[in-house]
Image (cartoon, grey):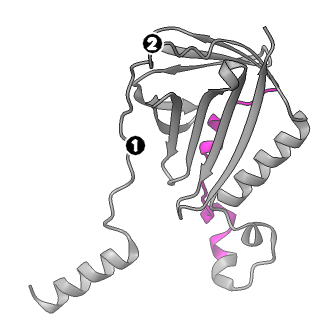
Amino acid sequence: MNLRVRFLLAMCIALGACSTPELLESRDGTVPPGLDLSGNWVLRDIPAAERHRISDAIRKTDGIDERALYGRPQTSQVRRRGHGSFKGGLVYVFLETGSALKITQTPHALFISFDRSVVEEFRFGENRIVSVGQIEAQRVTGWEGRELVVETLDKNGMKLIDKFRLLDGGNTLQRQITFRSRRLEEETILQEFDRAD
């Protein structure tokens, strides 16, 4: 291999230009025996506080340098590029939240109604592209032990990991929401819901 090819290969690796994008692997679509997340669930914490915690987690992991967005440009190069060049993760648009959840589980999917306004469907074993408007992401859903795991990955490398499991003999639903940046920084929020039926 000549010196020029070696140099180009090294530059390509150093810049990450040759790296393949992350792809999510499919998960087990078989519901564990006797596990049913169905029911009406009420959030223990104050909804406004939860929204604030989620907003903070998104801000810390979306990959956008807020100083660059809201600060004064320091160089003519930044000034020429403008704000359009600051691209971050958008996977958070796929997150639905609510203080009252109604969950219906079938052998093949989970349906969650958030505050009686939005219904989200998670098909067990799915590995597909989901979209909100023009924003697309890869989604996989399946079981990891007795926990339902939903992973959503956008094209900029930001990942949303949503996990649901039962605690206290089935009287508590725990939801773990994790935002992961392209640089693998993570922010996790734990929510607990009490059974209301």
Q: Out of 191 and 49, give the one closest to the viewer.
A: 191
Residue at image position (68%, 84%) is 76
Is residue 168 positioned above or below 111 on the image? below
Residue 92 covered by magenta stretch: yes
Of tags 2 and 1, which is closer to the observer?
Answer: 2
Q: Is residue 165 found left or right of 7 in the rendered image?
A: right
Q: Alpha-carbon neighbours of circle 1 within 10 Å: few (<14), some, or many (≥20)?
A: some
Q: Is mark 2 on a helix, strand or loop?
A: loop
Tag 1's secondary structure?
Answer: loop
Can you tell which quarter of the image residue 195 is in? top right
Q: Which residue is drawn at 53% across and 61% down?
A: 184
Q: Identify residue type, mark 1.
A: Leu
- What is the total number of numbered labels drawn onto the structure image? 2
Q: Does the magenta stretch include residue 7?
A: no
Nearer to us in this view, 12 or 108: 108
Q: Earlier in the sequence, mark 2 or mark 1?
A: 1
Q: What's the magenta region? A: 80-99
Q: Where's residue 104, x and y in %?
A: 62, 10
Look at label 2 and name its amino acid.
Answer: His
Q: In this view, does 86 lie to the left or right of 124?
A: right
Residue positioned 45% across, 15% down in the render: 33
Q: Name the residue under label 1.
A: 24
Horizontal and vertical percent position of residue 32: 44, 20
Q: In which quarter of the image is the C terminus?
A: top right
Residue 121 location (% of width, % of height): 56, 18
Say the numbered circle drawn on residue 97: none
- Disc 2 designates what residue? 108
**Left or right: 71 in relation to 161:** right
Viewer-proximal residue, 120 or 129? 120
